[in-house]
Amino acid sequence: WILRAEDRVGLAPVPDWAPAGFGLRPGVPAGHITRTGWSQDNVAAEVSETWFDPEVAAYVARLA
């Protein structure tokens, strides 16, 4: 079980492997989120990265 998560939001270059339909070219700065989730034993159990175009999407986090 993931007990808690931390999101860090900033900018990062779009990766080379981004799909063509993403809208931003690789290397261009985009919104970037790194999420780390910790288990009930306080061990980092998962990490994810998400890139987004702030012109078409807004970041919202809801943790319950």
Image (cartoon, rainbow, N blue to C red):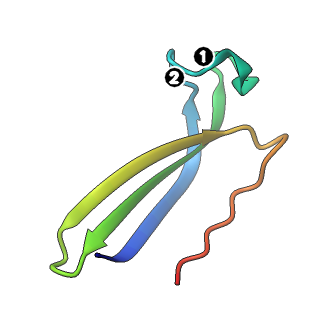
Residue shown at 19% from the left, 77% from the top:
42
Q: Position of residue 56 (x, y in %)?
A: 84, 42
Tell whether label 2 touches label 1 (CB within 8 Å). Answer: yes
Residue shown at 40% from the left, 71% from the top:
5
Identify the image quadrant of residue 4: bottom left
Q: Decide: is 17 above or below 46.
A: above
Q: Nearer the viewer, residue 54 or 18?
A: 18
Residue position for label 1: 26
Which one is earlier in the sequence, the residue at label 1 or at label 2? Answer: 2
Secondary structure type for disc 2: loop
* Horizontal side, residue 64 vs residue 24: left or right: left
Identify the image quadrant of residue 23: top right
Picture quarter with the N terminus: bottom left
* Horizontal side, residue 13 vs residue 47: left or right: right
Secondary structure type for disc 1: loop
Residue position for label 2: 15
Q: Nearer the viewer, residue 25 or 10?
A: 25
Q: Position of residue 46 (x, y in %)?
A: 30, 57
Q: Nearer the viewer, residue 31 or 50?
A: 50
Q: Nearer the viewer, residue 2 or 50?
A: 2
Residue shown at 57% from the left, 22% from the top:
18
Identify the image quadrant of residue 25: top right
Q: Decide: is 63 above or below 8.
A: below
Amino acid type assigned to the residue bearing label 2 in the image: Pro
Amino acid type assigned to the residue bearing label 1 in the image: Pro
